[in-house]
Amino acid sequence: MEIEDLKEQMDRLVDESLLNRVNEKDFSIERIFNYPLLKAAEASDPLFDKLKDSTVIGEHHLAPSEWLNGAKSVVSYFLPFSREIREANRVEEWPAKEWLYGRIEGEEFNKLLRQALVDSVEEAGGKAVAPSLDSRFKRTDLRSNWSERHAAYIAGLGTFSLSKSLITENGCAGRYGSIVTDLLIKSSSRPYSGIEEYCNRCGQCIERCPAGAITGEGKDVQICSDYLSNVIIPRYRPRHGCGKCQTAVACEKVIP
């Protein structure tokens, strides 16, 4: 299977799926996501084993082969939010309505894409698992047993920032997804060696964080989580999200 075949299918869903737009009586978003970036990594890449280190994620993080016997490849993608959503969240003091819909309704479209990739692999005679959709997926102490962002880093999609967002060639405002498959898909290049190579530490994410969770040393995920739980969710339930750090303009301009 060629990764270009999967990319073509995903692009078509971005254009055609009703889940990639919002059309309510008094509010609409023409397009939640733009076309995805898509790359592949070998399931045996030693970086997946490093994720079990307690300084990265922890022993509970499952390797590709633990999700799927005979795993050969991990396909990872980044779904960038549309300009409409990104720009709305730059000017609002609170999370923009567009961002909240993108975060919640947009994730339904993201689930559709994950399942579409699984179905494509199975139609090609292979097996696949989307860890984030699997019944075994869980979180322990704010860390899940499958990290979409770390899978994206290993596949070559981008590097981390002070805010722990992943900076890709299309910025870091968006959502991630991945599948593990027993089909061999040619691995993509990983054009970096440092985990924060694309972050220039300009400090924009520090200034934009309403919770004060980000410093020059990095991000305190507990402070971020508490802000979402105690401030954002009560205010915007049933939706939630913030994304102020992810919509820093600097994160869209640092990649060579």
Image (spheres, rainbow, N blue to C red):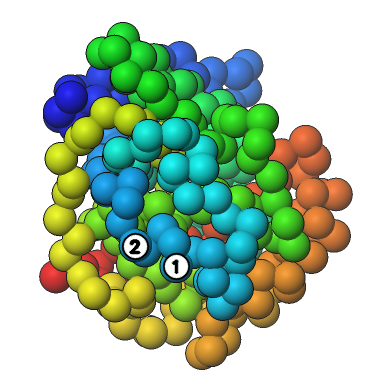
The answer to whether marks 1 and 2 mark residues whose Cβ atoms lie closer than 8 Å is yes
Disc sitting over residue 50 in the figure: 1
For the residue carrying disc 2, how many other residues have a C-alpha within 10 Å: few (<14), some (14-19), or many (20+)?
A: few
Is residue 245 at all visible to an observer of this figure?
Answer: no
- Determine the residue positioned at 38% across, 22% down: 127
161 on left or right of 208: left
Residue wearing tag 2: 46
Amino acid type at mark 2: Pro
When the figure is inspected, residue 91 is found, relative to residue 108, above or below; the finding is below
At mark 1, the secondary structure is helix
Amino acid type at mark 1: Lys
32 on left or right of 244: left
For the residue carrying disc 1, how many other residues have a C-alpha within 10 Å: few (<14), some (14-19), or many (20+)?
A: some
178 on left or right of 134: left
In which quarter of the view is residue 141 placed?
bottom right
Disc sitting over residue 243 in the figure: none
197 on left or right of 228: left
Residue 82, position in %: x, y? 37, 40
Q: Quadrant of the N terminus?
A: top left
- Determine the residue positioned at 35% across, 14% down: 122
